Amino acid sequence: MNKFIEVNNLCLSYKEQQVIKNISFSLEQGKIYGLIGRNGAGKTSLLSLLASFNQPTAGTIKIDGEVPFENARIMQKVAFIYDRDFNDESSPVKEMFDTIKRYRPNFNEEYAKYLLDRFELPLKKSVNKLSKGKKAALNVAMGLSSRAPITIFDEAYLGMDAPTRTFFYKEILEDQARYPRTFILSTHLVSEMDYLFEEVLIIHRGELVFHDDFETLISRGAAITGDSSKVDQFVQGKKKLSEQTLGRTKSVMVYGNLTEDEKEKARSNGLDIGPVSLQDLFIHLTEEGK
Amino acid sequence: MKKKSIRTKLAIDLFTLQGQWTVWFLGIMFVVYIAHILYPILFSGESGRTVDDFYARTYIFGNIYMLIIGIITSVSCLPYYVQNGITRRDYFFGATIGTLGLTIVIPLVALIIRFLTKGIVDWINLPIELKGLPDIHIAEEDPFIAQMILAVIDAPSVVETIELSILVFMVNLFFYYVIGWMIGSGFYRFGGINGLLFVALALAIFLINAGIWGNPVPGWLPIPDLTLSSYVASIIGTVLLIFIVLGIIRLVTKNMRIKL
């Protein structure tokens, strides 16, 4: 495994409050990572450390073998796109792209034009006069067209309508295929974006509670569907994540791997076993009190 | 090699951005200046008035202008460039060089406008007299506030030779810019109350500079008599202060957190 980003025992404190608690992980080049966590879990703090917006209180970060903070070679490679309000940005849209063109070595003008066109962004309009949705689209267009080897989107979709978000997700996948890079996507909208993730990191209260590939994560649970009474009988004693009932049919999400015997038993009782959703697992892993 | 080219780009960008603001600043100053010359002549028939020339006017207002753009760029440009993958170190050097360029251009433009206006005033024989820098006298026994205001707004002036005057003009503009940069950076990094300490520090540096140029400094302040023997020595004194302020800026911004 190539360790493109290596994080060891990372801690970050603001005055008395510890927001990142001893986090360690490594990420490979060219993969799409999902970083999920509840509000205030420390996602943005972690990402701002990766982007050299801030320095860790303790622990180390290495990107491409080097400490990124104040390292021109590495900082150039990291684009951190977060939910900015742009209210003080009176420059026209075009000027924002002119800056990226000057300072991001992998910036692709043609691709930027394509995105500007698709997002219907007016080049001459001042950024602070754009609607919330258009500002988010501009932010995303800047991030995608920079083609930085590490591109971080931290809830950059906020304010976009559903069709625009869908287009954004599609572009991540398509441009990733054309121009592979490491994406880190931080989100609340787990159910909407889960298909993008190759690996998932879940952080909760400043700690990394899970990091593995998407398939491994969702195999940690199962959805049992079938006759209500048979389902109840089958899931007895198991950790239930959620349940839905429709007439006499019931579907229950359970946490924990099923043994081959259990799977066989379920089938013989006429029960369906399906994958659990990342959203349900996320809710379970980050429940209050955990 | 690459590092150099990033700093050059930054220097050009900062020069261009601040240059655009300066065109507005000088443009507005010029319009007000023309109105100041023409209004009394056209509407009250006043004649024989003396008006300070454009160069002298820019000499005074340019400093406050530089102080303001120093503050603005420190809180807006550094975060903007870090967001674009630029290190704080590269920004520091780029902004310093770009602004040096600006401080060279402003006095020259002011001088050209001065010659042009003077030429036009003479040519159409306007009944006014253009003069150089106003002579402000504040004595040691004047109130502290008066001395303080003088220390901040009154740029040290040299009127004897134009070359020396231009050099002092340039050094002053840069001095005021770095003071603004220091105040803005202090506020950005340390917030409200602690940021105010940087204003206090700036006032202290202004007073030291005033002392260097022979302006009165309140006796009760622990500032020794710094009056230097010649203009050249005073210029060197201000340049040294500039380096000290640049050092403070670098210390404050070196590891500065970029706010989201």
Image: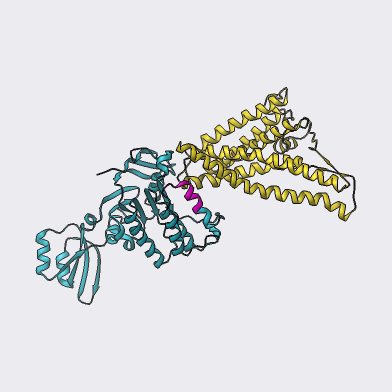
Chain colours: A cyan, B yellow
Q: Main secondary structure of the magenta part?
A: helix
**Position in image of residue B108 (x %, y %):** 70, 39
Question: Residue farthest to the top?
Answer: B229
Q: Work out whether residue A235 can be spotted.
A: yes
Q: Which quarter of the figure is the N terminus of chain A placed in?
A: top left
Please, is residue A274 above or below residue B23 in the view? below
Please, is residue B113 above or below residue A237 in the view? above
Answer with the quarter of the image where residue A176 lies. Answer: bottom left
Q: Is residue B126 toward the left or the right of residue B103 in the image?
A: right
**Position in image of residue A172 (x %, y %):** 35, 58
- Which residue sits at x=79%, y=36%? B136
Residue A103: in magenta span: yes
Quick one: A266 or A215, which is closer to the camera? A215
Q: Is residue A226 toward the left or the right of residue A193 in the image?
A: left
Residue A155: in magenta span: no
Q: Work out whether residue B196 can be spotted.
A: no
Answer with the quarter of the image where residue A258 lies. Answer: bottom left
Q: Which residues are magenta?
A: A97-106
Q: Is residue B9 toward the left or the right of residue A276 in the image?
A: right
**Position in image of residue A272 (x %, y %):** 16, 68
- Which residue sits at x=90%, y=50%? B46
Q: How many marks?
A: 0
Quick one: B11 or A14, which is closer to the camera? B11
**Position in image of residue A283 (x %, y %):** 30, 59
Please, is residue B100 above or below residue A239 in the view? above
- Which residue sits at x=79%, y=42%? B53
Quick one: B64 or A172, which is closer to the camera? A172
Quick one: A30 or A17, which is closer to the camera? A30
- Which residue sits at x=31%, y=58%? A196
